[in-house]
């Protein structure tokens, strides 16, 4: 019997995701080359339109009448593409609203479930293609509180995921965030999926696809609900001024998950902590150099000996007036292994014209 093809692999993956530990992982990829170059440590330092993703309370630093940001990156030699676009607008001196869209997708996947015709002959003209995509829409709001330096923010997010014509899911969730500024220090806390994010999966399989599933030893997927459990991200950042033109920003984050033990630097039977560290050096507020580390893991070799592995990241940025262009080189595999991704992002402010 013919192999089920790529479609079966993707549907089997979706079915396995009923376990909540790694649900909606595309939402952990981050947005903005600035933050990715700093090792994904950005919940306290986020101060532009990308704060709608990292920490909506940081949207209060948006200047201008409208700020627009966009990002493009590719993974696994261009097989997977990840894109982001966001818009932020101050409502008044105390509140800001933003809308963000994220898409992670693999396109042109061959579907070989109909490769063999009813007479048992290979017919390559019967091969079609489909896309597997994860999409998220975020509506964010931030507001200053009466306590000096304290601000709050929240996200309402709608998730749509699809695997060609075979499966789709709709999900809804909420995030809540705080930020407290005191002098050069910033302290932040972000609760992601605070109520649990529910994804309702539904499947639509042809009789031929069902037959291929059964003949290749795969279970038929059934409609169900996948839940993304809450997580808490804590961050602290500090700004340093070095002379009249050089400034340094350093941030340390800790992402806390509560879905049993993960392969992280800090792990217990019920809680895991994943630290991140990033720095940014700016000159004249025009040119920026960035570096960061994250994803600390213990990796065992063939002899069972464990070693500490981590993901290094570097980046550069250029800001001229109201336009900022950023680039990051991130390592999505083991340190020292050339599995790098190039990330580009653009941000600009729009101002209303004034008349004298």
Image (tube, rainbow, N blue to C red):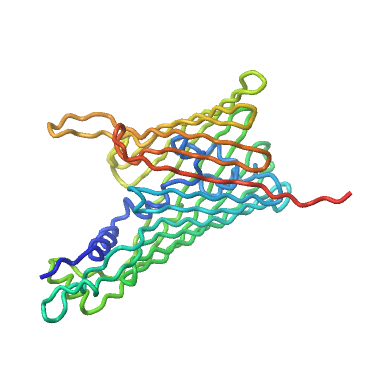
Give the side of residue 159 with respect to residue 88, left or right: left
Q: Is residue 24 above or below residue 310?
A: below
Q: Is residue 227 above or below residue 333?
A: below
Q: Position of residue 334 (x, y in %)?
A: 29, 36
Above-or-below relation of 271 to 18: above
Number of marks in the rendered image: 0
Q: Nearer the viewer, residue 319 or 291?
A: 319
The location of residue 20, given as percent across then percent down, is 32, 54
Residue found farthest to the bottom: 118
Q: Residue lying farthest right?
A: 356
Give the position of the N terminus as an image quadrant: bottom left
What residue is rendered at 48% in x and 46% in y?
31
Front-most of residues 124 and 26: 124
Q: Position of residue 79 (x, y in %)?
A: 34, 53
Residue for point 49% across, 35% down: 235
Residue 159 as seen in the image, left or right of residue 206:
right
x and y, in percent, of residue 106 in the image? 35, 58
Q: Is residue 44 left or right of residue 233?
A: right
């Amino acid at each position: 019997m013919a192999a089920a093809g790529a479609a079966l692999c993707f549907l089997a993956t979706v079915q396995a995701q009923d376990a909540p530990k790694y649900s909606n992982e595309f939402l952990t990829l981050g947005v903005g080359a600035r933050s990715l170059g700093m090792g994904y440590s950005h919940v306290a330092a986020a101060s532009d339109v990308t704060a709608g993703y990292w920490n909506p309370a940081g949207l209060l630093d948006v200047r201008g009448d409208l700020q627009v940001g966009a990002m493009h990156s590719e993974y696994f030699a261009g097989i997977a593409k990840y894109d982001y676009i966001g818009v932020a607008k101050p409502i008044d001196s105390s509140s800001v609203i933003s809308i963000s869209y994220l898409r992670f997708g693999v396109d042109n996947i061959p579907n070989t479930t109909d490769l063999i015709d009813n007479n048992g002959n290979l017919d390559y003209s019967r091969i079609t293609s489909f896309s597997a995509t994860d999409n998220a829409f975020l509506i964010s709001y931030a507001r200053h509180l009466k306590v000096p330096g304290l601000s709050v923010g929240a996200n309402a997010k709608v998730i749509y995921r699809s695997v060609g014509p075979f499966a789709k899911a709709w999900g809804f969730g909420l995030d809540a965030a705080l930020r407290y500024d005191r002098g050069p220090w910033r302290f932040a806390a972000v609760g992601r999926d605070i109520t649990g994010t529910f994804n309702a999966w539904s499947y639509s399989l042809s009789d031929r696809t069902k037959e291929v599933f059964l003949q290749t030893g795969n279970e038929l997927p059934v409609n169900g609900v996948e839940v993304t459990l809450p997580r808490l991200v804590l961050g602290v950042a500090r700004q340093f001024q070095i002379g009249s033109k050089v400034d340094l920003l350093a941030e340390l984050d800790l992402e806390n998950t509560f879905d049993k033990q993960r392969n992280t630097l800090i792990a217990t039977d019920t809680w895991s902590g994943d630290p991140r560290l990033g720095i940014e050096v700016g000159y004249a507020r025009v040119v920026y150099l960035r570096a960061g580390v994250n994803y600390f893991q213990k990796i065992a070799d063939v002899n069972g000996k464990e070693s500490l592995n981590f993901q290094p990241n570097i980046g550069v940025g250029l800001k001229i007036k109201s336009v900022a262009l950023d680039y990051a080189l991130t390592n999505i595999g083991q340190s020292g292994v050339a599995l790098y991704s190039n990330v580009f992002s653009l941000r600009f402010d729009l101002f209303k014209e004034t008349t004298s």
